[in-house]
Amino acid sequence: MPDSSVPAEPAVIVPRLQALSAEGLKVRYRNGALGIVDVSLSVEVGQVVALFGPNGAGKTTTVNAISGFLRSEGARIVDGSVTVFGVDVTNKEPHFVHRLGLATVPERKKVFPALTVAENLRALGHLPSRQRRKEVYDRLYALFPALAAKRSDLAGKLSGGQQQMLAIARSLVCEPKILIIDELTLGLHHCLHEPLFEVVSRIASEGTAVMLVDESTGFALEAADHCYRLGAGEVKDSGPSARFRGSELLAAGYVEGD
């Protein structure tokens, strides 16, 4: 029998590696308007972080600031910094950020409609060998079985949900270390929300840091480890997702718009 008088050793908590960090971001457009005024956040390896907030809160601007797509929006970071695995990527081009292992699924223009599913998967990823290509594509079709039967179909003929699956699958071809998804379930039937969030959780469980923007707060809070509530271009609240579940904090943020 073990000696009950000997206190148990405390559990060792191994800290996760920080994958992405944004500190005090301020973004200004060419016309002088501020897109965001003060956003700080971080995402760790294997963690799912969710951004919430009403329209105009600065969610997509924050995504573009991190992923390098601000220039296409006529904007730039004028204060603060973004780092990816400790490398400063503030105002860097998307290809520079991508080389560090960050992939983004944008809100719009997600797929090449005139290419087939299989051609979409091949369009952005360069894999070193036929065997490696087979391994990667088999994994993606296993993640999204609905795409496996449609690999020869034109992407433009897919349903909205299938196009979103294809956009995520295409972003995973290069096996990114960080995945950002802007509006995961926007415009999709409610029946697709749960399976998409299950895929997000699985991706994170395999070691990818995931940051997502979504209005489906119920599913997002179940999948996320941590969340940030944005309003008027700044972080209004943040914390472990469990703290927000079943509360009125996020609902109030959407209704009031801060």
Image (cartoon, helix red, strand yellow):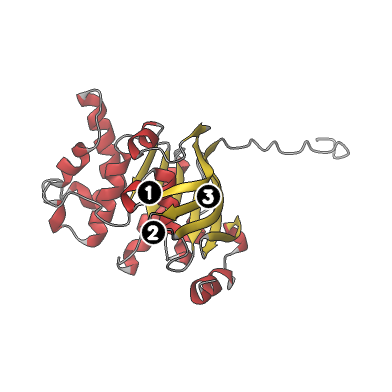
For the N terminus, which image quadrant?
A: top right
Q: How far apart, in angstroms, are the residues tagged by discs 2 and 3?
A: 18 Å
**Which residue is located at x 29 percent, y 45 percent?**
169
Which residue in the structure is indicated by mark 2? Answer: 31
Q: Are marks 3 and 1 in contact (CB under 8 Å)?
A: no
Q: Nearer the viewer, residue 212 or 256?
A: 256
How many residues crowd around disc 3 within 10 Å: few (fewer than 14), some, or many (20 or more)?
A: many
**Which residue is located at x 47 percent, y 40 percent?**
90
Report the side of 29 relative to 83 (left or right): left
Secondary structure type for disc 2:
loop
Q: Residue furthest right?
A: 5
How many residues crowd around disc 2 within 10 Å: few (fewer than 14), some, or many (20 or more)?
A: few
Q: Nearer the viewer, mark 2 or mark 3?
A: 2
Disc 1 marks a residue whose amino acid type is: Leu
For the C terminus, which image quadrant?
A: bottom right
In the displayed structure, 214 sits above or below 116; it is below
**Which residue is located at x 55 percent, y 57 percent?**
228
Q: Nearer the viewer, residue 148 or 22?
A: 22
User: Does residue 201 appear in the picture of this structure?
Assistant: no
Which residue in the structure is indicated by mark 3? Answer: 25
Disc 2 marks a residue whose amino acid type is: Asn
